[in-house]
Amino acid sequence: MSNWPENIARKSIVEFSAYSARGGSTSALHLDANESPYAPPPVKGAEGYNRYPEQQPSALRQRLADLYGTNIERIMVGRGADEAIEVLLRTFCEAGQDNILICSPTFGYYATCAQIQGAGIIDVPLGKDYQWNNEAIIKAASNAKNLKVIFLCTPNNPTGTIIQDDLVEQLCERFPNVLIAVDEAYEEFSSAPSYTPKTKEFQNLIVMRTLSKAYALAGVRGGVAIADPRVIDLMLKVLPPYPIARPVEDAIMNALSPAAMSTHAARLTEWLSERDRMFEALQSSSFVEKVYPSEANFLLLDVKDDKKLMDELSPRQVKIRDYRKTTGHMRISIGSPEENTIALEAFGVSVPEVSADRIGETHRKTKETDISVRVNLDDPKVIKIDTGIGFYDHMLESLAKHSGIGLVLTCKGDLEIDAHHTVEDCALALGTALKQALGDKAGIGRFGFVMPMDETQARVAVDLSGRPAMTFKGSFPTDHVGEFPAEMCPHVFESLAQTLGAAIQIEVEGENTHHMIEASFKGVARALRPAFARSGTDIASTKGVI
Ligand SMILES: *Cc1c(COP(=O)(O)O)cnc(C)c1O
């Protein structure tokens, strides 16, 4: 089959030559595309917007190849996984002749695209416990004439089930002239590994991934198809010449910056624990007959008394997906802890009154540093620091541990120049995240104070006054600890005081620079601990605001 996949693509797609579009700006003089020579106002941040983008912006394509663990030529970037699905059908399905196979209930867009393209739809419904009916799928595929694509959505929307056997591999082997399209829109939430590596083994396997769900970019529109480069090349002929707008590329690159990945991971952990909480809690709702286990960020429900449930949901403005007409189910997405608690109230489930965790998140990206910080003042479980400076990691870990907070901080800084930017910018970002987490500061202690430690004496006082101030008394016997410049120690607390809005006073005496710096960090941490601690809702100020 030397002409695969041309032999299964639409004839007209194979025959026409792709629209020629340059796109992208190089150092050449571009007078070939009737573009404006001026960046649009406001010029700042809009540099390059006057030029057409590349069809597949190369930095973005590379980033997504890295993210999904594949090579750049196996990736097609489009406006969401939706566009990948649409382009797949437009490339391979001849109108009035070819067919796709779906397993309902599943994502509705496969059928929509088939209808628009004029392709037929063969449905082999899911069976018991919403598992795939392997034998029936193989039988239907063997009997079908002109079958081009089999869509398998795993985890499946809306059932949340995953394929647990070798169905995908079996289909790839038995039907070499059918594209086996595995939609992994919810893979990040699932315990199963991605099928991406198998696209190297099976030339007819195509995997869809999206940035809309786990990476919080639904409004940006970004998704990919991953497949054999020959399949991707054919699809690129069908994809419009400039699908990825430059602001979209910027937004995706920022959201997926290396430092941001630790924040995504921390959120995912919280998200999955919320899925567990909702799964348990919804079972005790009098409106719920059954909650289906899910490997995605939603739960499928069998409900009873649905009219009454609607009466509870609508005044609270809680919207859930209503599939009663088609499948008799409802589907609820897993929101933030606060949102989920409101939804549970509507379902008549009483949840213990707990105040939400105080979480702060900051992303700070400049030419020198790319920093992502997530603090949780009420859950010290996760502490993960990576600044690239070993000693600083150790100090920040100590700060988190002794102040009793959770801290995920990643920085990719210009350490090849020196430690200065990294150290300072991390402290600034940390202060910003802490301030955000403190919110209105209701119930906090505000003041903290600590006395000497070990043979080194550090006296530290802290007031979360809202007014930045820092004093540091002490001089270090040596100028460095590892790659960490000792002079940066007071600077860290100055930066922290500035963005946190706190008065920090430090006095340190000792004979060993390492001990003196460590005592300063621990001292500040110990002073912050009671200042962060929350009891009741009073504002610790006679003015009523801090
Ligand atoms: C949400 C969803 C998509 C669409 O993703 P976009 O990237 O936003 O287009 C694709 N497949 C399934 C199963 C989905 O649920």
Image: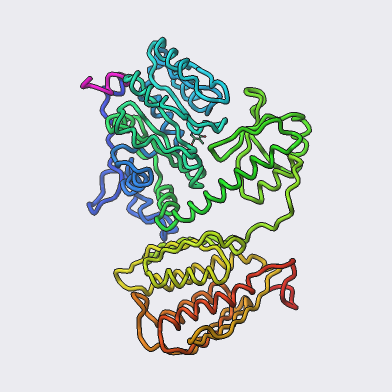
Work out whether residue 395 or residue 180 is closer to the camera in this orientation and state it.
Answer: 395
Question: Is residue 9 part of the magenta span, yes or no?
Answer: yes
Residue 50 placement (x, y as % from top left): 36, 50
**Total number of numbered labels?**
0
From this view, report whether residue 378 is shown above or below residue 223: below
Work out whether residue 12 or residue 502 is closer to the camera in this orientation and state it.
Answer: 502
Decide whether the magenta segment is chiefly helix, strand or loop. loop
Picture residue at 57% right of the left edge, 62% below the top: 380
Work out whether residue 367 or residue 69 is closer to the camera in this orientation and state it.
Answer: 69
The magenta segment is 1-11
Question: Is residue 220 part of the magenta span, yes or no?
Answer: no
Quadrant for the N terminus in the image: top left
Residue 140 placement (x, y as % from top left): 44, 13
Q: Is residue 53 visible?
A: no
User: Is residue 318 found left or right of 112 in the rendered image?
Assistant: right
Image colouring: rainbow
Quick one: which residue is furthest to the left in this view?
2
Picture residue at 34% right of the left edge, 76% below the top: 482
From this view, report whether residue 407 is shown above or below residue 498: above
Quarter occupied by residue 130:
top right
Quadrant for the C terminus in the image: bottom right
Quarter occupied by residue 167:
top left
Residue 515 placement (x, y as % from top left): 44, 82
Q: Is residue 128 visible?
A: yes
From this view, report whether residue 520 is shown above or below residue 212: below
Residue 222 placement (x, y as % from top left): 44, 42
